[in-house]
Amino acid sequence: MERDNEVISLKNIIIYYLNHWKLFLTSGIISLVIAILYLILYPKTYEVMSVVKIQDEKDLSSGGGISMGDAAGLMRSFGLGGGTGGSINIDDEISTLKSNSLLSKTVVELGLDVTYEQPFSFRTLYDDSPVVVYPDSMFRKNIDQVLDFQLQVNERGVLVKMRETGDKFTFDKLPVILQTDKGSLAICYRDSVHKETTIKLNISIMPTSWVAEDLSEDINIEEYSKTSNTIELLYSDHNKNRGKDLLNTLLRQYNEQANLVKRKDGNKSQNFLDQRIDGIIDQLKETERLIEMYKLKNRMTDIEYDVMFYSEAIKTYREKLIELEAQKYMVNLIEEYVKNPENKYKLVPAALSSGAGESDKSSPVALYNQALVLREKTLKSSKEENPLAEVEEKQIEKLRESVIVSVENASKSLDVVMSDLKSQEQAIFDKMGNVPTYEREYLDMKRQQEILQGVYLVLLQKREEVALSTEGGRDKGFITDAAYVKHKPVAPRKLFAAIFMVFFTFGIPMGYLFIVNRLKELLDELKRQKSCK
């Protein structure tokens, strides 16, 4: 039973609305007219797109191909560069692109603070405007509200009528300079326009910051992806050239502003680095001079090579001392042997004489041995009382004394030579004993020199990076795709017109009938309550 009631109620509703088909038809016709007017009169709007890659400034140091050897590691340890490129905050770059100051520069360059409209037109003119208005810098600085005026140009002259005050200004012909309380306006023909054309335009001049504020909302900037440094700029406009000029100029202004900031920072860094490099060079010169004086004072060349030289010298001295010690021992044996009375008429052994360096036939030992041999022959060939033997004995006695003196002199000579060698050896030992002190003091100065050299290389590399980054001509925003117009217009949209027609055709009449019925019921209820009273 309830189901039947619901069906009857729905039928009643449908029949009720069908009884008012004229209202729906009228609404449909009105919505159709409005939709057709929208599709015809609303200017075609196109979407302009540009793709930009934000380049990291730190990529410049690694991409320049400059290497400073050990300085790179030192720089990485100090956190001054030489590592991987730093991260880019895309949100910061987007906020810079949409900043009011940057957009204001773009507005001023393109003259977007001045809008030109033909009467009864929905579209604003850009490069197709027959005239151009140039506000001076004082006007743009002082204007704080919209200035509207109408411009008429015909064969009778030029008429400028202020919309707010109604003031009129007449001129013979363009170009003209219009003086206002805010500043001056220059009005002239566009170069491509025929000078005798009749013109009637409504012109509005807005503060540049207001136009920049509107553009900040109209320009859509999105990340290409979360893992890239690429962004997309989208802007919709019915004038294709204005849309492209806007995005291209905005990106150029962005790069110029980034380069200006980079140059300012680079100049400050260059001045600081130049001062530090000059100071480091002076310190290096002073340290190198101290090292030179220290080496000259201590007769040093290089600690490592000096130690090797001392070791070789000590080895040589040791060998000579051992040789001299052996000679001294042989000389002592000869001296002991010769001085012994029992060996008065005995030959000096050849081993002893050769060890003493007395192998020469003219040496005292050789002559002494010859005299002994001759005496031995004389004694064998004659009796002991032979006068010749006595002479030979006296000669042997003298030769023996000569040998003793010669041996003593040789011993003294060896002592002198050995003493000299030992003193030289001791001097080297003393010098080697001071080597740790020399090495420590030398290493302190050398370490200071190496630190200064490392800092010098770091500063040089940093100066080259700053110079390359400042003057390298590399834009922060690399334009992957310059501004281009998409093929399909984004307005007017047929879908929007169809949705509007459906809503207006059915929604408005149904809402009207619903409200009328509710009001009627409310009035009937009021009448009933009054009649009951």
Image: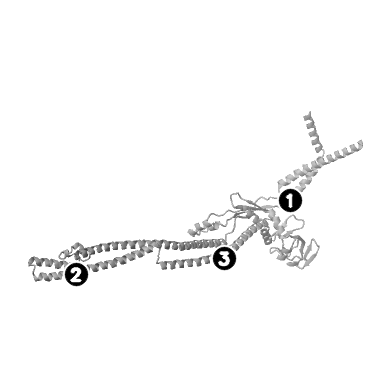
Q: Earlier in the sequence, mark 1 or mark 3?
A: 1
Q: Residue furthest left?
A: 382
Q: Residue at x 12, y 70 (%)?
A: 392
Mark drawn on residue 271: 3
Q: Label 2: few (<14), some or many (≥20) within 10 Å?
A: some
Q: Out of 261 and 103, give the one closest to the viewer.
A: 261
Q: Label 1: few (<14), some or many (≥20) within 10 Å?
A: few
Name the element at disc 1: helix
Based on the displayed image, in which of its 4 quarters is residue 525 positioned? Answer: top right
Q: Out of 46 and 227, give the one closest to the viewer.
A: 227
Name the element at disc 3: helix
Q: Earlier in the sequence, mark 2 or mark 3?
A: 3
Q: Earlier in the sequence, mark 2 or mark 1?
A: 1
Q: Position of residue 126 (x, y in %)?
A: 70, 59
Mark drawn on residue 40: 1
Using the rendered image of the protein, determine whether residue 398 is visible from the camera's viewpoint: yes
Vertical side of 251 occupied by 1: above or below: above
Q: What is the quadrant of the C terminus in the image?
A: top right
**Disc number lying in front (2 or 3):** 2
- Residue 474 falls left or right of residue 495: left
The Cα–Cα distance between marks 2 and 3, rounded to whole angstroms, is 91 Å
- Residue type marked 1: Ile
Q: Out of 178 and 60, give the one closest to the viewer.
A: 60
Q: Label 3: few (<14), some or many (≥20) within 10 Å?
A: few
- Residue type marked 2: Glu
Based on the displayed image, in which of its 4 quarters is residue 383 positioned? Answer: bottom left
- Residue 145 falls left or right of residue 389: right
Q: What is the quadrant of the N terminus in the image?
A: top right
- Residue type marked 3: Asn
Q: Which residue is mark 2?
A: 401
**Disc number lying in front (2 or 1):** 2
Q: Residue at x 32, y 64 (%)?
A: 422
